[in-house]
Image (spheres, helix red, strand yellow):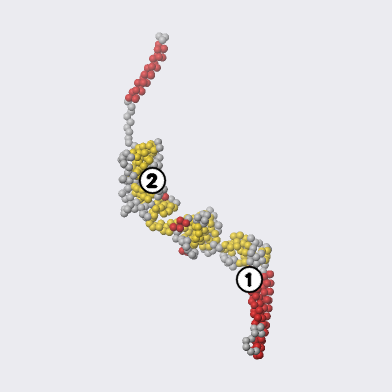
Amino acid sequence: MRNRPHYLKVILPVVLLLAGIVTSWAIVQSPPVVETAPPQVEPPRVETVAAQPKSVRLKVHSQGTVRACTEMELTAEVSGKVVQVAPGFREGGLFNKGDLLVQIDPRDYDLAVVKARARVAEAHGQLLREEAKAELARKDWQSIGNGEPNPLLLRVPELEEKRAKLKAAKAELEEALLDRERTELRAAFDGRIRERWVEVGEYVEEGTPLARLFAVDRAEVRLPLDPAELAFLDLSLASQQDLGAKGPKVILRASLAGKRHSWEGRIVRTEGVIDEKTRMLYVVAEVRDPYGYLDAAQGAPLPVGLFVEAEIEGRTFNPVHLLPRRALRQDGQVLVVNGQHRVSFREVEVLRVEGEWAVIRGSLQHGGGADADFVGARGGSRASDSPCGDLGLWRLVFDSGDLGVGAGGLFNLRGYPKGDKALGQNGVALGFSLKRKDQLHRGKIGGKAAFVTCH
């Protein structure tokens, strides 16, 4: 009885081990039946856009800085002390054509005018006396002389001298009057003062800059363009004159005082040369009445120095197709669906890409058939029910859900025979053996499990 616990300690573990072995063997010999179903491949989903031909007016974008069409330095034309300036003679001050801006002390010039007039009167008197003497000499010769008289006897040289002195005196008077007029510096146009460099009481020499002025009747913007963009504009480098109202319309936009504003103008000329450093061609846009002096209801003023964005109205092209930019592949192709729901690649001529849209020149027709619909590789309506035909369109999808190599995972498998390995359109070997076009083909790409389906 005392040895019974010893036997239990030896026999019980052996019994449990044998029971476990028997149970494991039973599980292995009778595995649970698992029903397997073929993998369900969801057909690719694509987005289609109706590709209808239309007439499109293109636009060319640029930018530049507003500047005045007319700008000048107000310069002293005579020497003297500044004795008066206009009340608005300061930075930003407004003035009208003919306004007196700066007055230089005119007293010295008034005296010069008086002296010049005295010299004219003196020269005129001398000429009258000389003419009387010449007349007496002519009568004396007629009474006693025979033949042609000597010019010296008729006092011809003295008469010409007095006439020349009178002309010189009159010229001096005109010069004195002109200098007197130049003491008054008046505005040559309606405008504003950009900078002021003189004060009342300062002495200025002839040629001293006093201020910088600019006109407010018109403003212009130099807009750089790539020479290739001239193909979209009705402009000519050979134009000999400003286009004026016949030039292409341009819309200028900028933020001012916390708001977005726009101004309308015209392209009036091209500068006719290409910049050697930037390789750009400059065109000039003109805006009339930029400060709204003639029409206060036109909106915000267009100040000189403002940086603006320009949108130039271009030529009209017809017919063209306007497609989403994402529809365009890097090799200049798009995917199209014809009337029989067949998907195929189509090479197109890209006229221009603007923002999210691409402008395609020409037609997307299949020979004489109807226009096609563009097909993109993004979510949308189904196009997977279209037959692949001899020129099969296939889609490579990794088991992880990632798309395969290439744009959107799309490949053009050019009818490879049974058992051959497929080659992607971009030259990448897919590593799949094709059997049937409607069958799921599995394989590996770079060690990753993947499958190919008919698109």
Find disc 2 in the rendering and name its residue: 377
**Res 178 label:** 1
The residue that appears at 37% across and 21% down in the rendered structure is: 20
**The quarter of the displayed image where residue 384 is located:** top left
**Foreground tag (1 vs 2):** 1
Which residue is found at the position 31% from the left and 54% from the top?
368
Q: Position of residue 31 (x, y in %)?
A: 33, 27
Q: Amino acid at mark 2?
A: Ala
> Element type at marker 1?
helix
Left of 90 or right of it: where is 318? left
Circle nearer the N terminus (1, 2): 1
Contact check, label 1 and label 2, Cβ < 8 Å: no
Question: Considering the numbered disc 2 on the image, is that residue within a helix, a strand or a loop?
Answer: loop
Toward the top, the furthest residue is 1
Observer-nearest residue: 126 or 188? Answer: 126
Residue 372 shows up from this direction? yes
- Image location (x, y in percent) of residue 127: 66, 81
Q: Is residue 436 left or right of residue 151?
A: left
Answer with left or right where residue 5 lies relative to residue 261.
Answer: left
Q: From the image, which quarter does the C terminus lie in?
A: top left
Between the residue at mark 1 and the residue at mark 2, the CA separation in whole angstroms equals: 81 Å
Q: Position of residue 318 (x, y in %)?
A: 39, 57
Seen from the viewer's position, the closer of residues 227 and 211 is 227
Q: Is residue 404 left or right of residue 191?
A: left
Q: Residue 181 or 2: which is nearer the viewer?
A: 181
Residue 2, by quadrant, is: top left
Going by the numbered disc 1, the residue's amino acid type is Leu
